[in-house]
Image: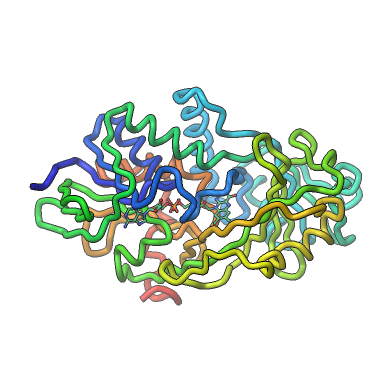
Amino acid sequence: MSEQYDVIVIGLGAMGSATCHELARRGVRVLGIEQFGIPHSMGSYHSGSRVIRLCYYEHPDYVPLLHDAYKGWERLERDSGESLLKLTGGIYMGPEDCEFIQGTLRTAREHDLPHEPLTHAQLARRYPQFHLPEDHVGVYEPKAGYLLPEACICALVQLALRHGAEIHGQEEVLGWDDHESHISVRTQRATYEAGHVIFTAGAWTSKLLGDIGVELEVTRHVIGWVWPKKPELFELGTLPIWGIDDPTGYFYYGFPLMPGVAGMKIARHYAGRSTTIDTIDRTIHPADEDDFRPAISKLLPDSFGSLLSMGICLYTNSPDHHFIVDRHPDCPRAILAAGFSGHGFKFATVMGEILADLALDGRTDHPVDFLGLGRFADSPGGS
Ligand SMILES: Cc1cc2nc3c(=O)[nH]c(=O)nc-3n(C[C@H](O)[C@H](O)[C@H](O)COP(=O)(O)OP(=O)(O)OC[C@H]3O[C@@H](n4cnc5c(N)ncnc54)[C@H](O)[C@@H]3O)c2cc1C
């Protein structure tokens, strides 16, 4: 026998847990289904920290969404009584003419965001941790910091449950069908029916949805935790979250030492090695260290004392590395949010509001037209 809901959310990672929370807060009968435990470390949100920042060089249209995302995280902290967001400030560095610096400044000015441009000399005086080429400058942003992703997901799911959501972990969605009047969703345990379905399946989106007219590429990324040679330079309160656009074409970033974490987290943000969700190599190899050790040892010479841990995490890249938030092209009762391309976590709270709006009202006041599927029509990666 089928069970009936207003909305079913498939995948309870960053976007799905926030969407379940938002729907339950609005009094909607919602079922959230997650194939693994909650939380888990098989997808895109694990590894203890996620950067949040406002001066978004990627595209100025993200800024209004970020203002609402910050409000959402602050409200989640109040409602859950937990500390989930830590403002450390952020220091962004690179050659003066690179897109990271120019885009950050453009967005900051366009949206009147607090920021402080730093010359090379100012940067070197204020942040002696970094040894950068002479042409590198900086931009400091006071409102940047980090979120604790596993704790955020647990808080979102727990509050969703307290508001009456039904949440099933360890239950894989095997398929779904569009009937004229409703959607049905099949798992290994049961078939469920709902008026609407929201797909927030991250790296599994293509496996679940098949062809949506856009290629979603899954890539493998390595994260490292190191113990610094001079820990006093990298303490929380001394070091902000940071990012460097390196002239080698890669972007390196990292966090200060944090309570409850053995080492300091560092990583490389880049297009990544293409893989698939069924063939990804989840084994950590000694050579994975090459992703960050040479560059970090050069750019932050006092940082790399010893390597403590490494982890694997997945990006799901859209062709232009911007998010996809839209209705399913062949099924208006299905909403999808995917392609968060390695920078989506910070938006989860506002994405929850947007996806709830789209399912319940068919529209949203949040400015998300730039994230629609229509932008790929007749473009490479679109089909
Ligand atoms: C190394 C790394 C660093 C990052 N750093 C940052 C950062 O600093 N700041 C930032 O904002 N973002 C960052 N991101 C990106 C961010 O974490 C992702 O954009 C975000 O997690 C994507 O959310 P999602 O809900 O689409 O996917 P996920 O969070 O992976 O959630 C998808 C969920 O769907 C479930 N699922 C899939 N298929 C099924 C099925 N058939 N049945 C049931 N459940 C299913 C999965 O198990 C999973 O739990 C980073 C990502 C990585 C990998």
Q: Is residue 105 visible?
A: no
Quarter of the figure with residue 156: top left
Q: Nearer the viewer, residue 299 or 213?
A: 299
Residue at 16%, 53% (x, y): give it. 184
Q: Nearer the viewer, residue 362 or 235?
A: 235
Residue at 79%, 42% (x, y): give it. 234
Is residue 74 depicted above or below 1 in this figure? above
Residue at 52%, 29% (x, y): give it. 74
Q: Nearer the viewer, residue 170 or 204?
A: 170
Residue 25 x, y percent position in the rendering = 32, 30
Residue at 25%, 39% (x, y): give it. 30
122 left or right of 199 in image: right
Q: How many numbered discs, if any?
A: 0
Q: Nearer the viewer, residue 162 or 123?
A: 162
Is residue 379 depicted above or below 314 in this figure? below
49 left or right of 137 in image: left
Is residue 67 depicted above or below 326 in this figure? above
11 left or right of 236 in image: left
Q: Quadrant of the C terminus?
A: bottom left
Quarter of the figure with residue 122: top right
Q: Is residue 383 visible?
A: yes
Residue 35 x, y percent position in the rendering = 34, 52
Which color mode does the image show? Answer: rainbow
Residue 268 x, y percent position in the rendering = 66, 60
Quarter of the figure with residue 289: bottom right
Residue 188 x, y percent position in the rendering = 22, 55
